[in-house]
Amino acid sequence: MAHRWTNDLTPADVTPKEVWLNRRQIVAGLGVGIGAGAIAGPGLAYTPDPSLEPNTFEDITTYNNFYEFGTAKEDPAKNAHLLQTEPWSITVNGMVDNPGEYTVEDLIGGFDIEERIYRFRCVEAWSMVIPWNGVELADVLDRVGVQDGARYVAFETVVQPENMIGVRRRVLDFPYVEGLRLDEARHPLTMMATGIYGEPMPKQNGAPIRLVVPWKYGFKSIKSIVRITLTDEEPPTSWNKANAREYGFYSNVNPNVDHPRWSQATERRIGGGLFQRRQPTLMFNGYDEVASLYEGMDLTEFY
């Protein structure tokens, strides 16, 4: 299928992972704080612009929300090693031509795995830039065959109580569920991701396969998917069920709509150093190409 998406972050913006893993030691040896300015050397170039500087593999894999493994940001990295990812099956059901049990290979095999460098924004007002690897969700939907009348795509995360401390503590009403309108799901920006930095998806980041919707807050990008359902009704979503006043179905990044307990007008870039200034939040997280999906909608009501 034709790909209409154009990336404004290129592979040249991503420093090789092995360089990033050593960055803190290099910077510390120079006596310079991270984010203090550009540093150049053989095979080494950093930009002081925090909106373009990709995050380290360490940042991406140690600062996460994955409530099945605990509520603190460091909990998933500590606890997700218990997640059992083999064998893995994904139930595809509802309004599809080819329902059934699929492996990850069944769903994405034969498609080119792309690298997409996306800004990623969390509702708690922190952000990262992440090099994801995966395929467009639209390709997966075409493979299973979407029936006429389907308007939404619902997703469900695996539940392994014996391996997931957060499930045993009943932090949320598990299984974690999410959903998109069909046109959102089919937008070329929407990915089914299976890796980061060219390596298989770490467990704390949603192995073996997860959703990535870069213009929405991170909790919409559901992890460790075991069910995809096509439906004609708006599906329930976990955070909306937990607190509808604070979390709407759409959850687009919108600096003009505050969370009831904090402002969304600015954000803090993870990995930017202790004295980094907060930066303005961009409408749709900077992905203006999705604005046409919401023409005529009151985005303060449909938040």
Image (tube, grey):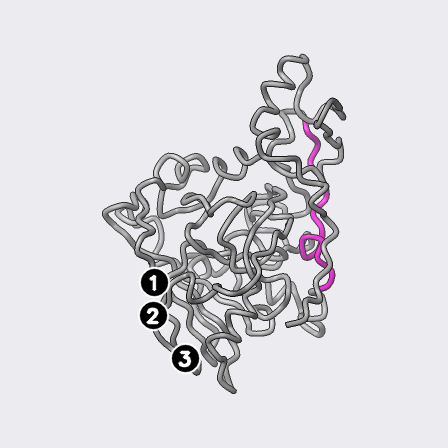
Tell me if residue 280 is in the magenta stretch: yes
Residue at image position (58%, 35%) is 17
* Amino acid tagged 1: Ser
Provide the secondary structure element on which disc 2 rests. Answer: strand
Seen in the picture, residue 298 relative to 51 is either above or below; the reply is below
The answer to whether one can see residue 192 in this image is: yes
* Amino acid tagged 2: Glu
Q: Which mark is residue 101?
A: 2
Q: Which mark is residue 89?
A: 1
Label 2: few (<14), some (14–19) or many (≥20) C-alpha neighbours in 10 Å: some
Provide the secondary structure element on which disc 1 rests. Answer: loop
Q: Nearer the viewer, residue 211 or 107?
A: 107
Q: Which mark is residue 98?
A: 3
Provide the secondary structure element on which disc 3 rests. Answer: loop
Q: CA gap, disc 3 to disc 2?
A: 10 Å
Q: Which mark is residue 57?
A: none
Which residues, given as a range, are shown in magenta?
Answer: 276-289
Q: CA gap, disc 1 to disc 2?
A: 6 Å
- Earlier along the polypeptide chain: callout 1 or callout 2? 1
Residue at image position (41%, 79%) is 98
Label 1: few (<14), some (14–19) or many (≥20) C-alpha neighbours in 10 Å: some
